[in-house]
Amino acid sequence: MKTPNEPHFDNGAPFSSGGLIIRQQEPKNLEAPFVPIESYLTPTELFYIRSHFSTPDLDQASYQLRIEGAVKHPYSLSYDDLRSMPSEKRIATLECAGNGRVFLVPQVQGAQWELGAVSTAEWTGVPLRALLERAGLEGDACEIVLEGADRGTPKEEPRPPEPISYAWSLPRAKAIAPEVLIAYAMNGRELPRDHGFPVRAIVPGHYGMASVKWLTRIMAVRQPFHGYWLTSDYAYWDSMDGRPVRRALGEMQLKSEIARPRVYQALPADRIYTVSGAAWAGETDVIEIEVSTDGGQTWADAEFLDPVRRHAWRRWKFDWLTPKKPGQYTLLSRAKDGGGRVQPREHDQNYGVYVINHSLPIEVFVVDSAGQ
């Protein structure tokens, strides 16, 4: 039974036919099995799925992407037009801003993601800035709005008066950054339907809601875009001149997670056990990783398995000689980035049900190895 100070883990959640953990049937929200991370790139069939409305059924032959708004030469592209342009590849980690929500105590509303609303893939597409340059982006355009074909009425209050399309806005500086892609391929193959077929945005370094799927419209605007998702949903409390203000979420925050062992797993006493996981950040590099096996009282360096790559996770491992004394132990990991920031110990309440980037406790049981 769940106690007031103990997070709930839905380890009995059903799995989809592809091996993903079902968090919501409709719209489709499926979690990647984070235990273990066997490969640097997440296999496409195991990449987490986050949807706000029902998956739209788009036809490749009739698909059109409109680029309009504060541009000199608005135009439309077909799927073949986009694929005929010079392409680039990016390896990027995407994370849902609510990943780890099950660790919040008391339990909060929203999909009860555990650890696996995060995955890494190689994306192929055309840089967004190339499309904006072709359109002649006006000098006073301050944001770029990305709009998808998925449409409906949000369940969360305050609800808009009529159905809306999913849309997200990027600051101009981020939109024209070289890493942002308008992608049509994932891990070397065309996008699956649940991952945005035929075309989606990939915004490395920002939480997943910025990487709009089923993209049909790119609109440059001269005033900040205050759409539903940036104000009523994916927003947090900040301070301006001593007064609280709401701002849209953006850059992913420094984070690490333990993938192995699982929560409440039994481990033999006095044995070497390899603890493993991954660490990532938004616009900085993860340069250090530490592990604690005593609830944060002491820390030891872990070993990275992957080199530094901006916008992508680094897997790591730590060989732990389990205690001789059986009992319950709390494992934690914490990362440090190139700017000197350290992963926090507690959740920042200003983020509400989002940005769960504090060190997440993995409780394990060390048992008498003689009985193994």
Image (cartoon, rainbow, N blue to C red):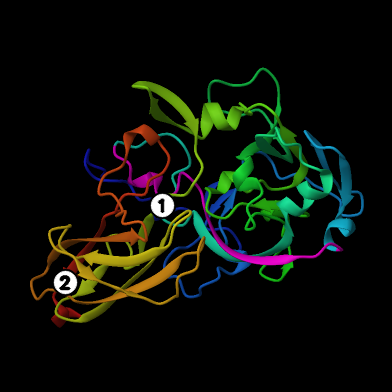
- The furthest residue to the top: 161
Image quarter of residue 352: top left
- Identify whether 100 is placed above or below 52: below
Q: What element carries label 2?
A: strand
Give the residue displayed 43% in from the left and 68% down from the top. Answer: 314
Is residue 188 in the magenta section?
Answer: no
Q: What element carries label 1?
A: loop
Q: Give the range drawn in magenta.
A: 84-105
Please, which residue is most extreme toward the front here? 139
**Residue for badge 1:** 114
Q: Quadrant of the image for the C terminus?
A: bottom left
Could you say which is closer to the camera, residue 242 or residue 33? Answer: 242
Is 107 drawn above or below residue 37 in the view shown? above
Q: What residue type is labelled 1?
A: Glu
Instruction: Please state the horizontal and vertical placement of residue 148, each as a whole percent of the image.
Output: 72, 41
For mark 2, what is the residue? Answer: 367
